[in-house]
């Protein structure tokens, strides 16, 4: 993927994250790892790898939020994204 495409995906995931945070009345620590990364979609000066890592982290957390357990389809996606994000470190 090109950097611009990764940033578009990052933007989409960030919008889903923001919508979920608005839906829940109490703040959740689920997105803490993403917040600590410090890479937002509008930080276009950041590297492609930084945005890729943010996409993997957000994707993992979103899949965990939507999964029933770790053996469901989205649970397995979350596990794969976690492994891919670990390899990027």
Image (spheres, helix red, strand yellow):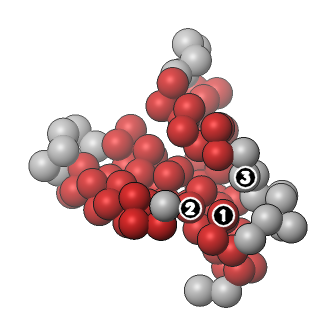
Mark 3 and mark 1: Cα distance apart in space: 7 Å
Mark found first going from the N terminus, 2 or 3: 3
Q: Residues within 10 Å of mark 2 (few under 14, many from 20)?
A: many
Could you tell me which residue is drawn at 79 percent across and 65 percent down? Answer: 46
Measured Cα–Cα span from mark 2 to mark 3 = 9 Å
Q: Residue 87 appears in which quarter of the rendering?
A: bottom left
Nearer the N terminus, badge 3 or badge 1?
3
Instruction: Report the residue marked by disc 2.
Output: 53
Marks 3 and 1 close (CB-CB < 8 Å): yes
Give the CA distance from mark 1 to mark 2.
Answer: 5 Å
Which element is circle 3 on?
loop
* Disc 2 to disc 3: CB gap under 8 Å: yes
Q: In which quadrant will I find the N terminus?
A: bottom right
**Of the numbered discs in the image, which one, if any, rests on residue 50?**
1
Name the secondary structure under disc 1: helix
* Percent position of residue 35, x then y: 65, 38
**Residue linked to disc 3:** 39
């Amino acid at each position: 993927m090109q950097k611009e495409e990764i940033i578009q995906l990052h933007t989409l995931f960030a919008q889903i994250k923001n919508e979920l945070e608005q839906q829940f009345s109490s703040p959740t620590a689920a997105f803490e790892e993403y917040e600590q990364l410090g890479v937002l979609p509008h930080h276009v000066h950041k590297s492609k790898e930084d945005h890729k890592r943010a996409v993997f982290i957000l994707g993992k957390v979103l899949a965990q939020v939507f999964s029933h357990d770790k053996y469901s389809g989205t649970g397995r996606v979350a596990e794969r994204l976690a492994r891919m994000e670990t390899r990027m470190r």
